[in-house]
Image (tube, rainbow, N blue to C red):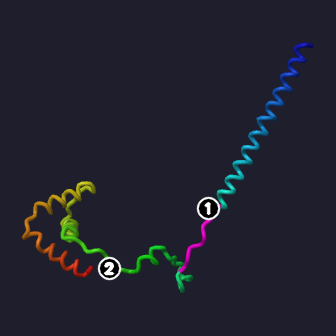
Amino acid sequence: MCVARNSLALAAAAAISFRRAFHSFRAALLTLASLVQADKKRKKKPAAKVKKGAKEKGAKVKDDDKLRPARPSKALSGFNFFFKAESKRMKETGEKLTYGSFGPHMGAKWAGMGAAERAPFMDEAKKDSERYR
């Protein structure tokens, strides 16, 4: 008889403990759900502005378009012109270099060139800087 009472008392205590744990877990879930819902409301962004006459195409206006009107690209240096010409030549001849060794190879080649060899590229750079101004 005593054992039965103790078992009933333990079962009742376990049920109460379980109920409390369940309700606190449920409250935590409801709090989390309300936080997620509030976060969703906060993150809504206004629709992107569309250029006039571009609604059919779906083109969007970027903020940079307003701040920076169309302007010429920056003037290239002599090394840039050398780099373009040399990489084109390497593609045509079929020379293969890994991605990591391509830049250092070009830099070493440029550094090893004399003023006479660099002159055509420097002339192009001078013309390009005139265009930029």
Residue 60: percent from left, percent from top: 52, 76
Q: Position of residue 65 (x, y in %)?
A: 45, 77
Q: Is residue 46 left or right of residue 109?
A: right
State yes or no: residue 27 in magenta. no
Helix, strand or loop under label 2: loop
Label 1 packing within 10 angstroms: few (<14), some (14-19), many (20+)? few
Tell me what residue is drawn at x 25 percent, y 55 percent.
98
Tell me the residue at 64%/61% (across/down): 42
Q: Name which of mark 2 and mark 1 comes first in the sequence.
A: 1
Q: Is residue 92 above or below residue 132?
A: above
> Which residue lies under the disc numbered 1?
43
For the point 18% across and 66% down, the residue is 93
**Which quadrant of the structure image shows residue 87?**
bottom left
Q: Secondary structure at mark 1?
A: loop
Q: Is disc 2 in contact with disc 1, using a CB cutoff of under 8 Å?
A: no
Horizontal and vertical percent for residue 8? 88, 22
In the rendered image, which residue does mark 2 sit on?
A: 72
